[in-house]
């Protein structure tokens, strides 16, 4: 696999990494190879994952909320966080979701919009992985249009009372704190709902075909009473949750390049050893065309991730940049995994090889945190100046 990874770096992008970046990348790659890769097939097939245990291991590596500063976080460059996402998603998108939902959605929401008391209460433990967070925005009838959410919070004296339901929430059933977004008379607000709050229940979604090595839940709130201190004071309107999504999508832009790279590396190795008509199938012109097109597409996606890393490191990344990256890179990664499966033939439909597992996972990544269609319209609006959402 190492030889295949080297051959896939046609533009010598690794040469541009600093010694610090390379050490970080290699450390996470070794953890992925030693701890994650030997178990991912079982986790995916069984539809289970030791999320709490893994969260503490990721915490010990310092990667949870690593791009945040203070409160036990590393203060790393966003591009370094991107390198981590690529290595984790090279094993499985569900595992990268564990890292990114914790750090870029739940932790970031508290970091960006929380009170000092909330930050001190939650961020150090979440950085260590000893406390798990989730981000509850999507509802059964409100996905791409979060402004239509039905979850409501009303004031009752000094308290807030929340009722509603959230759907497709990663880590929902194991979360110690849920960042819940609700409509109020003053607009959309964010609230921290602690595990065990009366009236709060979580139910896992089963029978998934995609992201099986990830916990996905429905959250139900039936007159959940919260103190005034549970409100995120800095979040006003949809700008709050949408800002968190922009933060998390940056990790996706990098992460999916890892999934595509892993699928293509496995395909290179397979094509070199699979013999038909008297020679390895890697020696046939049609196969080489497929491999060349996929390798170029992969490096283009990696270049897009690098450019967004430069922009974010410089504090210049805008939502349109992130939409460009998610639009381009998820589509490219999904196409690479599908084409890789075609080279593997029947072997490609088994979990012995990672290509179809990556592909079905990417079907979900194609949809979550802004569907492909939504990002199409974001770019269309940027190009034309016209809003086509309504």
Image (cartoon, helix red, strand yellow):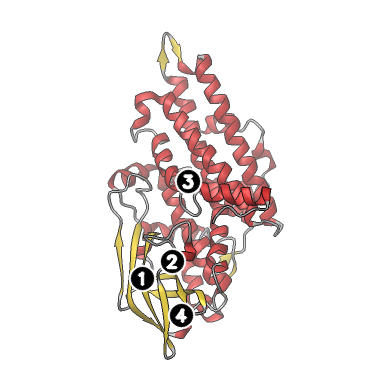
Q: Nearer the viewer, mark 1 or mark 3?
A: 1
Q: Are marks 4 and 1 in contact (CB under 8 Å)?
A: no
On the image, numbered disc 2 is attached to which residue? 149
Q: Residues within 10 Å of mark 1 (few under 14, many from 20)?
A: some
Residue 372 shows in the view: yes
Mark 4 or mark 1, which has the lower sequence index? Answer: 1
Q: Label 2, secondary structure: give it.
A: loop
Q: Nearer the viewer, mark 4 or mark 2?
A: 2
Q: Are marks 2 and 1 in contact (CB under 8 Å)?
A: yes
Residue 274 vertical position relative to residue 157 in the rendered view, above or below: above
Q: Are marks 4 and 3 in contact (CB under 8 Å)?
A: no
Looking at the rendering, which quadrant does residue 167 occupy?
Answer: bottom left
Q: Is residue 226 left or right of residue 67?
A: left
Residue 20 shows in the view: no
Q: Is residue 250 left or right of residue 275?
A: right
Q: Residue furthest top?
A: 278
How far apart marks 4 and 3 lie (CA) works out to 33 Å
Q: Position of residue 364 (x, y in %)?
A: 42, 47
Q: Nearer the viewer, residue 121 or 38?
A: 121
Q: Position of residue 384 (x, y in %)?
A: 67, 49
How far apart marks 4 and 2 lie (CA) works out to 20 Å
Mark 3 or mark 2, which has the lower sequence index? Answer: 2
Q: Nearer the viewer, residue 200 or 71?
A: 200
On the image, numbered disc 3 is attached to which residue? 366
Residue 164 marker: 1
On the image, numbered disc 4 is attached to which residue? 230
How far apart marks 1 and 3 lie (CA) works out to 26 Å
Q: Label 3, secondary structure: give it.
A: loop
Mark 1 or mark 3, which has the lower sequence index? Answer: 1
């Amino acid at each position: 696999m190492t030889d295949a990874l080297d051959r896939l770096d046609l533009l010598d992008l690794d040469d541009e990494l600093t010694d610090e970046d390379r050490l970080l990348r290699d450390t996470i790659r070794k953890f992925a190879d030693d701890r994650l890769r030997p178990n991912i097939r079982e986790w995916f097939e069984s539809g289970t994952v030791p999320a709490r245990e893994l969260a503490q291991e990721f915490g010990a590596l310092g990667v949870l909320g690593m791009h945040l500063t203070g409160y036990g976080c590393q203060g790393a460059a966003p591009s370094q966080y991107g390198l981590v996402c690529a290595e984790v998603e090279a094993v499985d998108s569900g595992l990268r979701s564990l890292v990114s939902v914790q750090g870029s959605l739940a932790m970031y929401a508290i970091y960006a919009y929380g009170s000092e008391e909330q930050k001190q209460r939650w961020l150090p433990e979440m950085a260590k992985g000893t406390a798990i967070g989730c981000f509850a925005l999507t509802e059964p009838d409100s996905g791409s249009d979060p402004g239509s959410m039905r979850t409501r919070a009303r004031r009752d004296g000094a308290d807030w009372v929340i009722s509603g339901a959230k759907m497709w929430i990663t880590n929902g059933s194991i979360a110690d704190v849920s960042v819940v977004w609700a409509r109020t008379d003053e607009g959309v607000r964010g609230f921290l709902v602690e595990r065990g709050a009366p009236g709060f229940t979580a139910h896992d979604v089963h029978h998934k075909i995609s992201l099986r090595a990830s916990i996905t839940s429905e959250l139900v709130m039936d007159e959940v009473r919260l103190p005034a201190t549970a409100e995120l004071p800095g979040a006003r309107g949809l700008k709050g949750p949408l800002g968190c999504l922009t933060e998390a999508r940056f990790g996706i832009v990098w992460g999916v390049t890892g999934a595509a790279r892993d699928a293509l590396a496995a395909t290179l190795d397979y094509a070199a050893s699979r013999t038909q008509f008297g020679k390895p199938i890697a020696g046939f012109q049609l196969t080489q065309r497929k491999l060349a097109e996929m390798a170029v597409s992969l490096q283009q996606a990696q270049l897009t991730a690098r450019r967004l890393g430069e922009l974010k490191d410089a504090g210049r990344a805008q939502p349109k940049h992130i939409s460009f990256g998610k639009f381009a890179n998820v589509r490219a990664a999904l196409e690479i995994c599908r084409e890789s499966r075609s080279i593997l033939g029947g072997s490609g439909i088994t979990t012995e090889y990672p290509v179809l597992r990556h592909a079905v996972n990417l079907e979900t990544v194609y949809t979550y945190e802004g569907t492909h269609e939504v990002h199409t319209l974001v770019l269309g609006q940027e190009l034309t100046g016209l809003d086509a959402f309504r």
